[in-house]
Amino acid sequence: MSALLTVSDAHIAYGKVEAVRSVSLEVADNEIVTIIGANGAGKTTLLNAIMGILPLKGRVAFAGADMVQLEIEDRVAAGLSLVPEHRELFATMSVEDNLQLGAFRIARAVAAQSFEQVYTLFPRLKERRRQLAGTLSGGEQQMLAMGRALMGAPKLLMLDEPSLGLAPIIVADIFRIVGELRSAGVSVLLVEQNAQAALQIADRAYVMELGEFVLDGAAKDIASNARVAASYLGFTHEGESAI
């Protein structure tokens, strides 16, 4: 598979404090890649830098084009989209108006197709399309944040902690939809503390600790790694509870 996103030797700093060091990753077409790690490992920082929210020293290439000097809007136009951890919806606007904002850069005909796709993936949003975003449940707000990002017809969707604060049944629904996105031709870069759920759905995984990748490989191999199992999955590789 050809690489859709390539990050090479990325360094990201807050002032003089380097939060991410020498990180490289790839996401291919029609691939789900997850980054797992503890709070403060640098996962969100990396996604924000790829999106252009934070400055990055290194190389970011998307669909063969250099992204480092591009503004956020130009990265979105190129097909890169981020669903942030805190969703950042417009609470006093309707569901449909929030979705419409995600399509502001695309043609009306494409936007109509995007609405159809989003409402097919998230039928609950169609039911609540006139409802104010701030009155939705946490799961519905996450669906809306994902739907808004999908309105721009991205080639790669970056998701930052989509399961945060959600009930297990809603988490299962969100991850099922992520799998459907891959089938629809959208690649996904997923940052997730629920490592078990992320590794079940991903093709490949990176393990991040203290701003660096310490392990990467096929998701099934990462899931069976003894260190990962003990640190992030809550059990040892023999299947016993971790101490």
Image: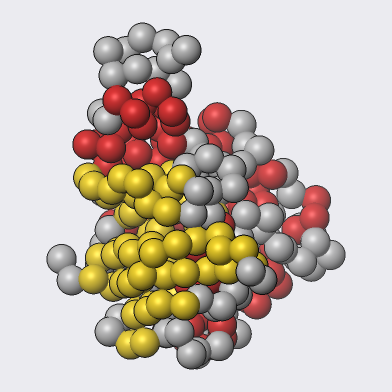
Colour convention:
secondary structure
| Residue 10 drawn above or below residue 78 | above
Question: Is 110 in front, or is 73?
Answer: 73
- Across and down, in percent, residue 92 comes to 84, 65
| Residue 182 drawn above or below residue 81 | above
Question: Going by the image, does 33 lie left or right of 210?
Answer: left
Question: Going by the image, does 24 lie left or right of 134?
Answer: left
**Measuring 72% from the left and 63% from the top, which residue is drawn there?**
89
Evaluate whether residue 43 shows in this view: no
| Residue 155 drawn above or below residue 160 | below
- Across and down, in percent, residue 214 comes to 35, 46
* The quarter of the displayed image where residue 98 is located: bottom right
| Residue 26 drawn above or below residue 230 | below
Farthest residue to the top: give it.
Answer: 240
* The quarter of the displayed image where residue 26 is located: bottom left
Question: Going by the image, does 2 lie left or right of 214?
Answer: left
Farthest residue to the front: give it.
Answer: 16
- Across and down, in percent, residue 126 comes to 60, 58
Question: Going by the image, does 35 lie left or right of 106?
Answer: left
**Measuring 46% from the left and 45% from the top, which residue is drawn there?**
209
Question: Is 192 in front, or is 124?
Answer: 192
**Measuring 28% from the left and 84% from the top, which residue is drawn there?**
64
